Amino acid sequence: MKAFKIFLVGLILGLAVGLWFGVNLGRDEPLLSNPFSEKSLQKQLQKTGGEMLEKSGQALEESGKALKEKFSE
């Protein structure tokens, strides 16, 4: 009976920690951050804006390379 209680406590703690980490992974947050905190609108906009700038920069680089190749021929 004692082994069953230890197993049950370990299972419950494992599920809680796994849920904590899983929520943080799904939200692209650090593992040990609070999964119940809400993302601020400013933080979401900064992240989205940064990603958009990075993608547009890559697109500009690719188009610049294509133009260089076209004019060098």
Image (cartoon, helix red, strand yellow):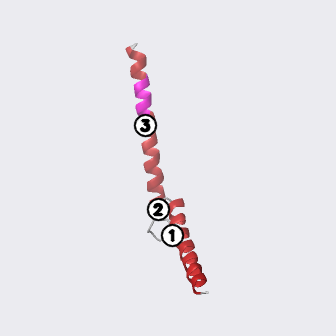
Label 1: how many Cα within 10 Å (few below 14, some 14–19, many 20+): some
As displayed, is residue 50 above or below residue 69?
below
Q: Residue 57, how many percent across, how many down?
A: 41, 38
Residue 51 falls within the magenta-colored stretch: no
Q: Nearer the viewer, residue 47 or 34?
A: 34
**What residue is shown with label 1?**
35
Tell me the number on the disc at residue 59.
none
Label 3 vs label 2, nearer the camera: 2
Distance from disc 3 to disc 1, alpha carbons, whole Å, reads 33 Å
Q: In this picture, which residue range is highlighted in magenta? A: 60-66
Report the amino acid beneath label 1: Pro
Indicate the secondary structure of the residue bearing disc 1: loop
Mark closest to the chain's N terminus, 3 or 2: 2
Mark closest to the chain's N terminus, 1 or 2: 2
**What residue is shown with label 2?**
29
Mark closest to the chain's N terminus, 3 or 1: 1
Residue 64 falls within the magenta-colored stretch: yes
Q: Is the C-beta separation of discs 1 and 2 under 8 Å? A: yes
Q: Nearer the viewer, residue 8 or 21?
A: 8
- Left or right relative to 50: residue 4: right
Per the picture, the main secondary structure of the magenta-coloured stretch is helix
At horizontal 40% and vertical 16% (from top left) the residue drawn is 71
Report the amino acid beneath label 2: Glu
**Quadrant occupied by the C terminus:** top left
Q: Residue 42, how many percent across, how many down?
A: 45, 61
Q: Is the C-beta separation of discs 3 and 2 under 8 Å? A: no
**What residue is shown with label 3?**
58
At horizontal 47% and vertical 45% (from top left) the residue drawn is 52
